[in-house]
């Protein structure tokens, strides 16, 4: 198991200790100099010595190796994992497009790639406040985060928009979360959560427990869990890089995490060659609007890929097409990445003799309510019966 040496800013390389400062609940979440994402760094010399003894193929065949993301224990912090079986999601071959595969992160226990980072964050938190029994509650923004809090036997304070569906309400309550309903969007939920977390930080002196903030996808512990997606992609492709990645916008997956995985694997001699070109389908406006942060955009540029801006309708056409023709219910973000494939293949930027991977960050059913509202469906009372003739390409 590797030894963590420090945290390092992904922008300015400023280094921070992993030890908890006396006045704080956890180590810092962001760079104190420029607010950049902090990355967990290991003693790579010790890791390299180990990697020389054990090549990845042997490591993969070792008896008793975990079937999920914890199979990469050699390159993860040493701890007792809080796990619901996340990781090792299917890599499916497209039935229609030569060379194209789908990495379906919707197969994770909570239906999203976020499970990897959240499992890691809750596992690491145990090392800071007394192990698996967990004294401090967590502040959460998704039902999946509440599921992992339950697995870690911690109370979750879950901030959700007031107009949530009855199914989501049921799941949140069953996971034992204390639900705080907020008027407005997820962004307003995030602001309210931050306010409450800051309040609990100052109330600590009065004997009140602090809340641990799980919600930021750029948190160093979440990035560290998210990197296992990068290791998995390379292992599932026979320890080689794909030529291109079709990447979704939004928070569930993180390019910073996957880029960190590539860097570490190259350092260990587990993979070589050109890193994949990354193409992102962005939805510019509307209810499914999603974009990338500036650090991720820098990675896209460095990879030799680019961002394609799409409208909501193009995304919805790709979503229904993949469901009907391939049996894969992509999320709106996954469908945005899928919609980028058409123009890229048409223009020869992605070729059939190449190996391309479409990353679907979460299960389409998680966005069922929004999709019901957005798709033109034939309806029998409350329920849809079919898409109109001509699908959603022809207006009805
Ligand atoms: Zn920095």
Image (cartoon, rainbow, N blue to C red):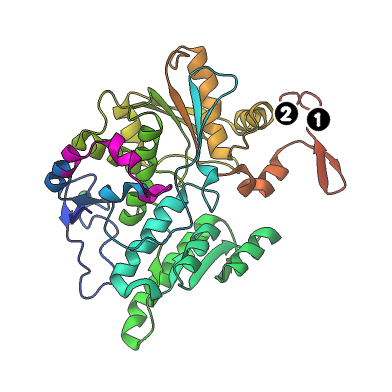
Q: Are marks 2 and 1 in contact (CB under 8 Å)?
A: yes
**Within the magenta stretch, is there residue 56?**
yes
Residue 272: x %, y % from top left: 25, 27
**Mark 2 lies on residue:** 392
In what element is the residue under mark 1?
Answer: loop
**Mark 1 lies on residue:** 388
In what element is the residue under mark 2?
Answer: loop
The structure residue drawn at horizontal position 53% and vertical position 52%, both measured from the top left corner, is 109
Badge 1 density bin: few <14, some 14–19, many ≥20, Cα 10 Å: some
The structure residue drawn at horizontal position 47% and vertical position 38%, both measured from the top left corner, is 249
Q: Quadrant of residue 11?
A: top left
Badge 2 density bin: few <14, some 14–19, many ≥20, Cα 10 Å: some
In three-dimensional space, the C-alpha distance between marks 2 and 1, rounded to whole angstroms, equals 7 Å
The answer to whether residue 84 is left or right of residue 295 is right
Which of the pair 378/354 is nearer the observer?
Answer: 354
Residue 255: x %, y % from top left: 36, 39
Residue 62 in view of the camera: yes
Q: Quadrant location of the C terminus?
A: top right
**Within the magenta stretch, is there residue 87?**
no
Relative height, residue 233 to residue 170 (above, below):
above
Relative height, residue 182 to residue 299 (above, below):
below
Residue 165 in view of the camera: no
Find the magenta span and give its range. Answer: 50-70
Which label sits on residue 298? none
Q: Quadrant location of the N terminus?
A: bottom left
Residue 181: x %, y % from top left: 59, 67
């Amino acid at each position: 198991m590797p030894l963590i040496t420090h945290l390092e800013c992904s922008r300015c390389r400023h280094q921070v200790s992993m030890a908890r400062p006396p006045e704080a609940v956890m180590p810092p979440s962001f760079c104190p100099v420029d607010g950049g994402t902090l990355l967990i760094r290991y003693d790579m010399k010790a890791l390299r010595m180990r990697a020389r003894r054990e090549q990845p193929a042997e490591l993969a065949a070792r008896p008793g190796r975990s079937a999920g993301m914890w199979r990469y224990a050699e390159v993860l912090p040493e701890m007792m994992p809080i796990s619901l079986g996340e990781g090792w999601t299917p890599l499916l071959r497209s039935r229609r497009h030569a060379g194209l595969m789908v990495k379906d992160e919707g197969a994770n226990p909570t239906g999203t790639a976020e499970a990897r980072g959240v499992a890691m964050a809750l596992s690491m938190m145990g090392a800071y406040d007394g192990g698996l029994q967990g004294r401090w509650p967590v502040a959460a923004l998704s039902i999946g985060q509440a599921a992992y809090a339950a697995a870690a036997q911690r109370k979750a304070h879950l901030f959700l928009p007031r107009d949530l569906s009855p199914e989501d309400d049921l799941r949140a309550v069953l996971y034992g979360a204390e639900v705080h309903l907020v008027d407005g969007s997820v962004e307003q939920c995030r602001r309210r959560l931050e306010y409450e977390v800051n309040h609990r930080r100052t109330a600590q002196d009065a004997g009140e427990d602090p809340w641990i903030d799980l919600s930021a996808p750029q948190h160093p512990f979440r990035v560290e869990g998210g990197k296992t997606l990068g290791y998995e992609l390379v292992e599932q492709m026979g320890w080689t890089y794909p030529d291109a990645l079709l990447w979704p916008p939004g928070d569930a997956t993180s390019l910073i995490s996957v880029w960190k995985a590539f860097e570490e694997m190259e350092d260990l001699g587990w993979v070589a060659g050109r890193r994949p070109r990354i193409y992102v389908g962005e939805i510019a406006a509307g209810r499914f609007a999603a974009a990338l942060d500036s650090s991720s955009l820098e990675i896209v540029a460095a990879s030799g890929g680019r961002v394609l801006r799409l409208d909501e309708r193009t995304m919805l056409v790709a979503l229904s097409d993949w469901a009907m023709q391939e049996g894969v219910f992509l999320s709106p973000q996954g469908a945005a990445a899928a919609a980028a494939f058409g123009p890229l293949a048409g223009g020869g930027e992605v070729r059939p003799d190449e190996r391309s991977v479409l990353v679907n960050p979460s299960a389409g059913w998680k966005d069922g309510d929004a999709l019901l509202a957005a798709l033109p469906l034939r309806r029998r009372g409350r329920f849809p019966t079919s898409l109109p003739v001509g699908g959603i390409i022809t207006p009805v």
